[in-house]
Image (tube, rainbow, N blue to C red):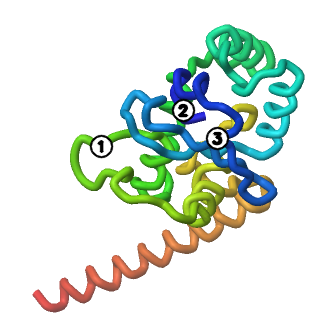
Amino acid sequence: MQERLAAVSLTAISQWEDFGNRYILIHIKALDTKARNEHVCIIPKALADWLRDYCKQTKRDRPFPNCRTLWHEITRLVLAKFGIQISSHYLRKRFHTIAGKTAMPVNSWDYLMGDKQSHGHNASTYTLEDFSDLVQEYDRYLMPFLSISDPREPDEPTKPFTTTSELDQVGKENAELKEQILKLTRILTEALAKQN
């Protein structure tokens, strides 16, 4: 999640908007953020549904009023299940790092983080009437890389070699290209020698 803990603890489920069958938009109020920027946060619908049920069970209007206590439980669970030591700030930095490696427009992911830029175009200076493009960008550029259980980077090769025959084929093509380059180098060297 790209949101700071304080904003998460202050945000009520009444600020959540169903967006299709995959995502929920959480409308973060400006006064609840460090940078004082109103923005949305996108979370998977399955997680949002679970959190809504949790709110009903605990009779709360906010899923995380006790976010500090819950965060300690989450960090223990992630460490036990995935062997990863995380902090809330780490998740925010991870979101920023991953977003910066994607083709998603900077203003879009800057807007999702609720950040205020120190120079250049500030994403919060425009009002989004329709979040469709933003959600499509998020789904295309960011969602595939935000998994904790299957961490990947946007700049990793998309399809590593899976079989020896694929690697052998690339090696054969490489040898053929090398041979062609050597032949061309000899031809060019001979042509240059004849000119001099």
Inspect the image, locate mark 2, and give the three-letter code of the amino acid beneath it. Answer: Glu
Give neighbour class at mark 2: few <14, some 14-19, many 20+ (Cα, 10 Å): many
Which label is found at residue 3?
A: 2
Q: Residue at x 61, y 70 (%)?
A: 173
Residue at the image position 55 percent from the left and 46 percent from the top: 40
Q: Secondary structure at mark 2?
A: loop
Q: Secondary structure at mark 1?
A: loop
Judging depth in this view, the residue of 29 and 141 nearest the camera is 29
Judge whether 124 appears above or below 179 on screen: above
Q: Which mark is residue 143?
A: none
Q: Is residue 176 above or below residue 40?
A: below
Kindly report the distance in space between the C-alpha atoms of the residues bearing marks 1 and 2: 16 Å
Residue for badge 1: 117
Mark 3 and mark 2 in contact (Cβ < 8 Å)?
A: no
Q: Which quadrant is the N terminus positioned in? A: top right
Q: Which mark is residue 15?
A: 3
In this rendering, the answer to whether 68 lies above or below 2 is above
Q: Residue at x 61, y 31 (%)?
A: 11
Q: Earlier in the sequence, mark 1 or mark 2?
A: 2
In the image shown, does 65 or 5 lie closer to the viewer?
65
Q: Quadrant of the C terminus?
A: bottom left
For the residues labelled 3 and 1, the Cα–Cα distance comes to 25 Å
Q: Position of residue 119 (x, y in %)?
A: 22, 46
